[in-house]
Amino acid sequence: MTHVIRYEALPDGLTVQSYREADDRLVIIVNSALSRDERRAAVAAALQASRQATCPCPQ
């Protein structure tokens, strides 16, 4: 899995946005106003959600 992480100003209350590009690359945009720990947690949560959404494993 290939992913890109970007840090940008997002609207208040929005911590992370993610989407897939045409080449199946996951793009994660994290609110740059968050603390370092909050940004790391947001990236981890986005990656985990993406993995769960694409996992062929039985849940």
Image (tube, helix red, strand yellow):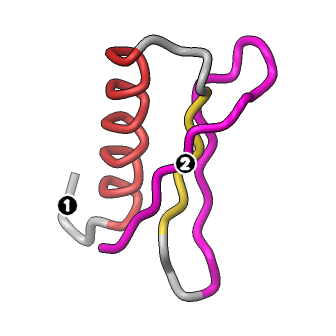
- Image position of 7 (left or right of 10): left
Residue 50: which quarter of the image?
Answer: bottom left
Is the residue marked by circle 1 packed among few (<14), some (14-19), or many (20+) residues within 10 Å? few
In the rendered view, would you say 30 is above or below 36?
A: below
Q: Amino acid at mark 2?
A: Arg
- In percent of width and height, residue 18 lies at 59, 50
What's the magenta region? Answer: 1-22
In the rendered view, would you say 31 is above or below 12?
A: below
- What residue sits 61% from the left and 16% below the top? 33
Residue assigned mark 2 = 6
Residue 7: which quarter of the image?
Answer: top right
Task: Give the residue at the far bottom of this rendering.
Answer: 23
- What residue sits 44% from the left and 11% below the top? 35
Asked if residue 7 is among those painted magenta in the image, a careful observer would answer yes
Residue assigned mark 1 = 58
Mark 2 or mark 1, earlier in chain: 2
Is the residue marked by circle 2 packed among few (<14), some (14-19), or many (20+) residues within 10 Å? some
Figure quadrant of the N terminus: bottom left
Q: Amino acid at mark 1?
A: Pro
